[in-house]
Image (cartoon, rainbow, N blue to C red):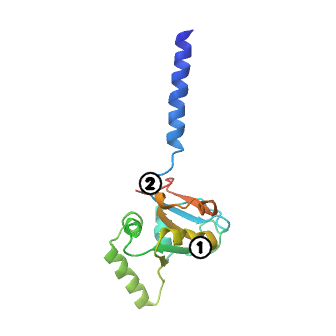
């Protein structure tokens, strides 16, 4: 009898640890992406779609229901932007600058609008239909996060 109770308690403990790990928030320094909760119906993107959005090659949400995309960047010299360049764009800061100079010369796509702080990006995304932004998880503002739809990227809640 005691053996069954101990086995049951052990099972419950292991299961609860597993559930807590599965539902854990991203690491504080993970790059998270979010959209305007009121207008965007898609809750996940592929890494390739995210790259296309931040290179201004994809201008409408892939679900065809959420309208046009307005992407917001952080400042070119911010650590968040460096993480975006490395993890999503797969280019250096210098390569990104060259990319946008070439696009301007060609008269093609414009870069996403840059904001100085993570708070400004969150505020803009929370107020603008079809908007998308990013920041480190640790910088998410409690008073704004209810208006943001956190996106999974290739099934992950944050990129590192």
Eyeballing the image, is 79 above or below 76?
above
> Alpha-carbon distance for marks 2 and 1?
30 Å
**Residue contact between numbered discs 2 and 1, judged by CB atoms under 8 Å:** no
Displayed quadrant of residue 83 = bottom left
Q: In the rendered image, which quarter contains the N terminus?
A: top right
Q: Nearer the viewer, residue 48 or 68?
A: 68
Instruction: Give the image location of residue 116, x and y in percent.
Output: 46, 75
Residue 60 has which mark? 1
Farthest residue to the top: give it.
1
Eyeballing the image, is 6 above or below 96?
above
Query: Element at badge 2?
Result: loop
Instruction: Give the image location of residue 112, x and y in percent.
Output: 49, 78
Instruction: Give the image location of residue 144, x and y in percent.
Output: 60, 63
Q: Residue at left 53%, top 39%? A: 20
Eyeballing the image, is 129 above or below 140?
below
Residue 112 has which mark? none
Q: Nearer the viewer, residue 1 or 102?
A: 1
Residue with the mark numbered 2: 28
Q: Residue at left 63%, top 72%? A: 127
Instruction: Give the image location of residue 53, x and y in percent.
Output: 50, 72
Q: Residue at left 38%, top 86%? A: 101
Label 1 neighbourhood size at 10 Å, few (<14), some (14-19), many (20+)? some
Farthest residue to the front: give it.
143
Q: Earlier in the sequence, mark 2 or mark 1?
A: 2
| Front tag of 2 and 1 | 2
Label 2 neighbourhood size at 10 Å, few (<14), some (14-19), many (20+)? few
Tally of marks: 2
Query: Element at badge 1?
Result: loop
User: Left or right of 76: which side holds 152?
Assistant: right
User: Left or right of 8: which side holds 39?
Assistant: right
């Amino acid at each position: 009898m005691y053996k069954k109770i101990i086995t049951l308690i052990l099972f419950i403990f292991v299961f609860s640890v597993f559930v807590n790990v599965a539902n854990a928030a991203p690491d504080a320094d993970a790059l998270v992406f979010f959209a305007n909760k009121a207008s965007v119906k898609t809750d996940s993107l592929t890494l390739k779609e995210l790259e296309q959005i931040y290179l201004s090659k994809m201008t409408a949400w892939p679900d065809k229901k959420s309208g046009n995309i307005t992407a917001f960047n952080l400042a070119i010299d911010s650590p968040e932007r460096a993480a975006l360049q490395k993890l999503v764009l797969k280019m250096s800061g210098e390569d990104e600058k060259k990319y946008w100079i070439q696009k301007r010369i060609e008269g093609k796509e414009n870069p996403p609008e840059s904001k100085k702080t993570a708070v400004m990006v969150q505020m803009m995304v929370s107020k603008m239909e079809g908007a998308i932004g990013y920041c480190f998880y640790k910088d998410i503002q409690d008073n704004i996060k209810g208006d943001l739809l956190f996106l999974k990227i290739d099934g992950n809640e944050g990129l590192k």
